[in-house]
Image: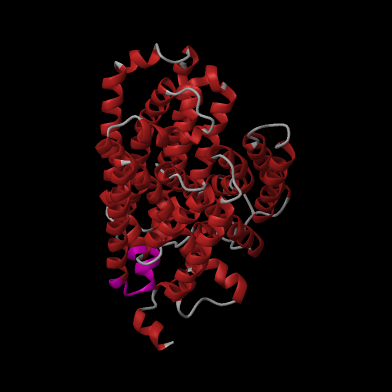
Amino acid sequence: MAKHAAIAIGLIIYLVLTTIVSFFWMRRTKKAADYLVAGRGLPYWALTGTIVGTCIGTGVIIGGSGLAYKHGWAGCAYPIGLGLGTLLTGFFFAKMRRYNFMTLSEEIACYYEANPTIVGFSNIAVFFSQLCWLTVQILGGAAVVGAVTGLPHGVCIVLAGFAKALISIPGGLKAVVYTDVIQTLILFGGFGCLIHSVLHTAGGLEGLRHAVPPEYFSFLGVDSFGGWKVFNLIFVLVVSVVADPGRRLTMYCAHTEAGAKWSMITSGVVVVIFSAAIGIAGIYTFRLNPDLTVTDEALPWLAMNVLPTWLAAFIVVAIVSGMSSAANGTAAAAGTFFVRHIFHMVTGRHPKQPLVVVRRALACVFIVSTTMALFTGSIVGFVVKFLPVTMSGLAVIIVLGRFWQRANWRGALAALVVTPAVSLAAMPFINNPILPATIMGAIALMVVSLLTAAPTQTFDQVAEALIFERESIEGKSLDKISAN
């Protein structure tokens, strides 16, 4: 009982502090650009903190440790995939910072001559992907709330969704970034204490090795999980980062192009290294209790049943910090995306009051994602099902658009149709159909592009044409909004 009370107090303090930070930045938001793109002045250290925090979210902490509980070092594949995707995105896409984009759809539009069909398709797919990622974060938060309180799963989901909305909505992207930095520090402090305690108690890695099945300690757990499954999980997560609007939004808001590039590369390396902590935590939990029926509960079970009170409270707050960082980043991207694209798609104009619209839109987004979470199973299972359908086509058109100048909008449309179709057709026969879907989508794009006319507008020409649309949203101040 004392442990539950200590954890509850820690979570309340954490929620109050992060909410204060969010409202602090809300009072200092003078223009829509401050809320939506953080004034495009984020420094390297802040970017690195928020990117790492966004990567190490629910999927890594709850899903990855649950996979490690069941298959040993295979749990590392989750953060490794996200880390590699982040690193590669920094290497190959950081130059997009120079164009002052607000969203990933603007970048896609420049690859394909701002074709309305491609832009509209990508708008819907990207926005839906953010709803799905936010659902993952709410699921993880619910798992922690359930472990601490013992409340019914549905109630925990609603509480987790409300708490994340309270932190994310008021202050906009600046609040998200600076709360993420704090949350990342808490996360690493908590996991640092956890791994030190685990290795000391278990007798180091050798002690763990002798206490679990030998296949757990195979390279990335391939002898337990299967080499093909490990590869597919890493691949699907690399693809998800390349096509992730949240990572792009972070890069677009960097103070410099170099800051955008090296913050992504640094973050990718840090997340790959952090994968070892996820593997150790999951394996150690299996050693102590090999009979858990829900693997996603591995880390919460460890905190609630094994760790001393002070460390359990620290770890639970660290877990919630990591998940909140990811949820905050996803929500920020969803809000910016709604104001820049979805509102215009529905109404035919840009909002006169973007700050009012984005906050109302985010409230609706949290309601929808919370509802989706009520009808969703395990986190890893959810990820490997929705990512091939929502993200593989986007990744294909982004990568080929970036590196193959002959790609045109007709080929992109073919890829956007083929990839989800292949994913859905293959899903009854293959657990994770992203690889065949991506290959078929790439082939479709290249064949159709070669059989049809080459593009007539360059990337820079389309980017210049988007400046006025973007500035009509970013430049609105609170005074102008109140006058409207």
Q: Position of residue 169 (x, y in %)?
A: 41, 64
The colour scheme used to paint the residues is: secondary structure
Residue 31 colored in magenta in the image: yes
Give whichever of 142, 146 is nearer the camera.
146
What residue span does the magenta drawing correspond to? Answer: 27-39
Give whichever of 282, 415 is nearer the camera.
282
Q: Position of residue 380 (x, y in %)?
A: 54, 37
Is residue 432 toward the left or the right of residue 333 in the image? right
| Residue 381 seen by the camera | yes
Please identify the quadrant where the C terminus is shown: bottom left
For the stretch drawn in magenta, the main secondary structure is: helix
Give whichever of 228, 407 is nearer the camera.
228
Is residue 271 toward the left or the right of residue 244 in the image? left
Q: Residue at x 40, y 55 (%)?
A: 328
Is residue 109 toward the left or the right of residue 219 in the image? right
Q: Residue furthest front?
A: 1
Quarter occupied by residue 196: top left
| Residue 259 seen by the camera | no
Residue 235 colored in magenta in the image: no
412 up-or-down from 78: above or below: below
Q: Position of residue 165 (x, y in %)?
A: 43, 60
Q: Residue furthest bottom?
A: 483
Please identify the quadrant where the N terminus is shown: top left
Report the label total: 0
Q: Residue at x 71, y 42 (%)?
A: 424
Q: Position of residue 42 (x, y in %)?
A: 30, 57
Q: Residue at x 74, y 40 (%)?
A: 425
Give whichever of 357, 439 is nearer the camera.
357
Quarter occupied by residue 348: bottom right
Q: Residue at x 39, y 51 (%)?
A: 324
